[in-house]
Image: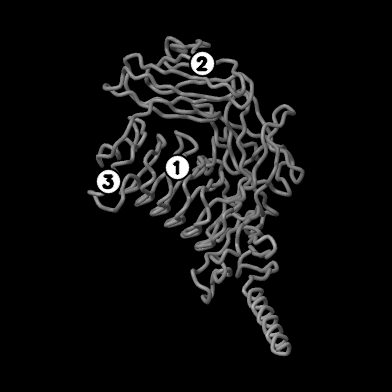
Amino acid sequence: MKKLLSVLTVFVVLLSVFFSFEAFGDEQESIPLTRLYDSDTYYSYDSDTKTLTISGEGAMPDLANSGTASNAQPWYYFRSSGDIEKVVVGNGITVIGAYAFYYVSASEIVLPDTLTRLRSYSFAGTNGLSSFDIPQGVTNVDSYAFYGTRNISSLTIPSSVKSISNSAFESCRALSSVAFEKTNMTVSLGLKCFLNCPELTALTLPRNVRLSNYSVGYSRASAGSVNTNMTLSVFRDSPAYDYAVGNNLSFELINNMALSVGDTAQREYLSSTLEDVMTFTFTPENDGKYDLFSTGAVDVDCVLKDSEGTVIAECADISGMDLNFLVTADLAAGEEYVYSVNSVHSQGVFDVTLLPYNTALVTGKVINLKSENSVAADAAVVNAGIVCEGVSLAHTDFQGAFCAFIPLGSSACIHTPSSVDRTLVYTPDLHRKADIGTVTLLNFDYCRDGYINAKDYAVLDNGGRALWEDFNISDFSACGKITESVYN
């Protein structure tokens, strides 16, 4: 009997060891840093933290929804097993490739501010996510990018997004909240973009949105399948208003628009809306003096009030010859202010622009070339300073782009250790805005005078080679309002 018990005990122990090895064998092991096909991007996997990490520079390659294709998704066989709880995409990655995280079960995905594009099906089926904030800097969300993602309930779309393609969020059945960062952002929504999102019952659409068939408000792609539970909030004089009326969708009108520093918002008074009061709210991040002014041929007045309704400033006409307004006031950080605009029995389109007092908004991009014969731009110049009278106003971002508020009547320079400082010569438009274009810094300088010269701009042929013959400053009118060239 004792011998039988001993045999049984050994058998049980052997079984337990066997199954423990089997269980251990099912666990996904760590993966060292591995190149993603022929790209400059890499992936690694840490089994202890269950974290998939993407690193490197530039665009991830498009992957296949397969474990055997030549461009197979490398984590295909453990993407939905629970082994991936977190995904981290490092700075330097600019594009999330097609099918990159298709059906990955992670409950957390960390994205960098270097992203510019989300490719098709890149996040479709990521059912562990409950919310998603598209990073600032992304300009394109491609078709089916989030198709059929079951559990995302909230979505934030930054003002950098210009295009959301066909069916990008189709059949996201838990999606109940979509927030566009700015009410005056320009963005296009593709065919069936938010089709079959039954929990999305309220949506505020930006003033400058462009919509396609069945973009929002439908359960199926047919005229008779309107989502009767949805109400759109739209501006009266907007494409979204025309879309709602033309498709018999439930809507309510917005007359209030939130502004940020540097914004320009276009509005219109019609014969039927002359009595409407249009309001613009502003909550400054910093104490200071700010200008709100109108441009156009419409006679409008403006009154500025604080959050308690006290009138702070008002303006009817800038002059007897200019019926636009300019309201200037000292404002406190964190306080909400309301600008109320009225038509003086005048119809038409007008713009309002919000800027720091007596400044122009100057934008541009800085890149670097190694030499006259450089095949293409060496790289974006990152963290170059935009300086005015010794004061740093802004720095270039990871794409070499900058946005600076420069005092009217002043010049500023681009300061970088690798090249002589470049003076920005600009002419603001009626909105006090100027695009200086693409500034190409060379490691040598034809004139070394510190100005942005005609010769400092690179013309690239179809092969990307820099061309320098027959250079003419008039060729660069599209690159910005350059007022002079001192190249001789």
In the foreground, 118 or 38? 118
Rendered image quadrant of residue 50: bottom right
Rendered image quadrant of residue 268: top left
Q: Residues within 10 Å of mark 2 (few under 14, many from 20)?
A: many
Is 485 positioned to the left or the right of 270 in the image?
right
Q: Label 2 is placed on what type of residue?
A: Val
Residue 101, x across and y down, in percent: 54, 61
Q: Across the whole image, how many numbered discs are drawn on residues?
A: 3
Cα–Cα gap, marks 1 and 2: 33 Å
Q: Label 3 is placed on what type of residue?
A: Val
Tell which residue pokes out farthest to the left in this image: 224
From the viewer's perspective, is residue 212 above or below residue 9?
above
Label 1 residue SS? strand
- The residue to which callout 1 is attached is 178
Residue 250, x across and y down, in percent: 29, 37
Cα–Cα gap, marks 3 and 1: 19 Å
Q: Nearer the viewer, mark 1 or mark 2?
A: 1
From the viewer's perspective, is residue 334 above or below residue 142?
above
Quadrant including the C terminus? top right
Q: Nearer the viewer, mark 3 or mark 2?
A: 3
- The residue to which callout 2 is attached is 327
In the foreground, 367 or 333? 333
